[in-house]
Amino acid sequence: MQKRISKGEAVFIVVNYIFLFLCVLITLLPFATIIAKSFSDSAAIESGKVFLWPVDFNTQAYKNLISDGQLLRSMKNTVIITVVGTFLNMVFTTTAAYALSKKRLLGGKTIMKLMTFTMIFSGGTIPSFIVVKSLGLMNKYGALWLPGLITVYNLIVMKTFFEQMPESLEEAARIDGAGDILIFFRIVLPLSLATIATITLFYAVAWWNEYFNGMIYISSSAKMPLQVKLRQMIATVGEAQLTETDGESPDKKLAKDAVQAAAMVISTIPMLCIYPFLQKYFVKGVMVGAVKG
């Protein structure tokens, strides 16, 4: 027998649905408009006619972006930066979090306080630049990977999750002769897949969107990340239009807004494709790792 819903519960459910619907609109409408602009004619964009649906459909913005062979190379560079960077992040974050979650670690609390301090105060851009240059990492991907090996927030989430694991699991493994390394790889990590997937997604998105450090430390066009290259290509369009010769047809005149929109779509698609595979772990991983029992 189904429980009858009271009037108050019904109102609460309706308000929730309305709120969620508004959240969906706020999230999707801007992105849908960006997609529409990327496929619209420059005149329609400049006149403000484009909203949700392309006007005078064309793919000139994408043709201009893709015709530059450097774009595909930059995308490959970003894939390398993202894959290697995320792997290094997870290796250092999981191992550091596991060690810091153990009360028997000497100086563990002090180390944690020092790392948390860096969330509030940092050395600054110029000191970081000097350090990277003195290490000979300029124009190398190591200049991106080394300073960002661990994000303290992600470390805290992982550490909190490890602290929630029953000590009886490790004690039973030690009785069977397992050491710290075997316990970590055979027991701790398999039980942490939800949190690991969530933190991996955080790191991957951050690396994929890497712009500022790439602009500062990478000067070679052959190693340029995607976001820096897209910014460079948008800048070459000019303040209003990228115009061909006077004899060219109007559809070859490209609005800067169209190029910007196409660039945003291209840079967003890979993360949108990856997210559905990790989504089932996302909420569980954040909740389990962020709430201490």
Image (cartoon, rainbow, N blue to C red):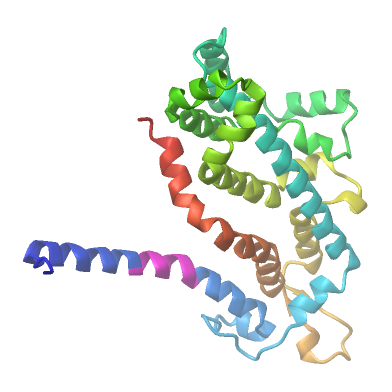
Is 193 left or right of 60, judged from the image as shown? left
Most frequent secondary structure within the magenta stretch: helix
Question: Percent from the top left, x then y, of residue 136?
Answer: 90, 28
Callout count: 0
Which of the 4 image quarters holds residue 10?
Answer: bottom left
Q: Over which residues does the magenta segment extend?
A: 21-29
In this view, the residue farthest toward the top is 106
Residue lying at 87% horizontally and 23% vertically, measured from the top left? 134
Residue 87 on image: x %, y %: 72, 41
Is 70 contained in the magenta span? no
In x, y percent, where is residue 101?
51, 22
Q: Which residue occupies the foreground of this view, 168 or 274?
A: 168
Quadrant containing the N terminus is: bottom left
Q: Is residue 222 above or below residue 192?
A: below
Residue displayed at 54% across by 75% down: 33
In-image side of 230 versus 67 (left or right) = left
Q: Is residue 117 visible?
A: no
Q: Nearer the viewer, residue 263 or 84?
A: 84
Compared with 288, 37 (above or below) is below
